[in-house]
Amino acid sequence: DIQMTQSPSSLSASVRDRVTITCRASQNIKKYLNWYQQKPGKAPRLLIYAASSLQSGVPSRFSGSGSGTDFTLTISSLQPEDFATYYCQQSYSDSITFGQGTRLEIE
Amino acid sequence: QVQLMQSGAEVIKPGASVKVSCRASGYTFTEYYIHWVRQAPGQGLEWMGWANPNTGSTNYAQKFQGRVTMTRDTSITTAYMDLSGLRSDDTAVYYCARDFPGPYGRGMDVWGQGTTVTVSS
């Protein structure tokens, strides 16, 4: 299976901060990379697909970049509702895998 | 609106099986694969597999092969996930999710509310 490694595992930040989360794949996955947000007790929400495309309805402060093995999710100006856990997910292989998650907390 | 509605929480004895249902509404059921993803308490997301509601074909994660069966009933637009040989480490929230066939592979754009499965004697 393709391993997805996120960093950091947790992050403290303040409202209006710019935050970047990194996801690294164990092999080249081109742009077969999606990002999700999950709040406690809720199902995940698709934010970014194909590494850099914003899902419909997602605020433009979220952006994604990267290809190959290294990817980033950036939140340009944190809002109170953005404090959550974020996961990357690859679908390059038939066996889909997720990163371990990055927990974004209020500083 | 597009929705996936899952069955209620289950408490299952070790060694037994559980069958979780996922009823789709608001879209053409046979046009999108259904994924199953689980999340153990305090842990991350784990993909279990997908099923094609149109053909019935499936693709299971190797970890679950031999223990999981994903089926569907198109007449009632419902997908099912059956997991057998349950152990305590199968205790988790189980989600169904609609496939998002993007330009680069598969994502999951609509999720059910989750079904808590607790394995306990």
Image (cartoon, coloured by chain):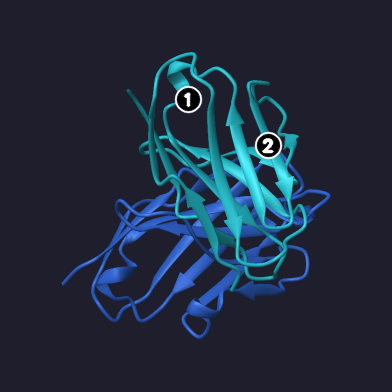
Chain colours: A cyan, B blue
Q: Vertically, is A71 above or below B12?
A: above
Residue under numbered circle 1: A82
The percent coordinates of residue A72 (x first, y second) are 62, 41
The percent coordinates of residue A67 (x first, y second) are 75, 51
Residue at the extreme top of the image, as rendered = A16
Q: Chain of mark 1?
A: A
Are the residues under marks 1 and 2 on the same chain? yes
Q: Vertically, is B34 above or below B61?
A: above
Q: Nearer the viewer, residue A26 or B45?
A: A26
User: Distance from label 1 to label 2 (Cα)?
Assistant: 15 Å
- Relative to residue B108, is residue B81 drawn left or right? left
Residue B99 visible in the picture: no
The percent coordinates of residue B55 (x first, y second) are 77, 70
- Relative to residue B9, is residue B107 drawn left or right? right
Question: How packed is label 1: few (under 14 Cα within 10 Å), some, or many (20 or more)?
Answer: some
Residue under numbered circle 2: A64
Q: Residue drawn at (68%, 51%), measured in percent from left and top?
A: A33
The percent coordinates of residue B111 (x first, y second) are 56, 44
Q: Residue drawn at (44%, 44%), measured in percent from left and top?
A: A8
Q: Residue drawn at (74%, 57%), measured in percent from left and top?
A: A68
SS class of the residue under badge 2?
A: strand
Label 1 with label 2: CB-CB less than 8 Å: no
The amino acid beneath tag 1 is Asp
Q: Nearer the viewer, residue B75 or A63?
A: A63
> Residue B32 is drawn in which quadrant?
bottom right
* The label number, if any, that marks residue A31 in the structure image: none
Q: Which of the two marks, 1 or 2, is nearer to us in this view?
A: 2
Q: Vertically, is B78 above or below B82?
A: above
Quadrant showing the N terminus of chain B? top right
The total of numbered circles placed on residues is 2
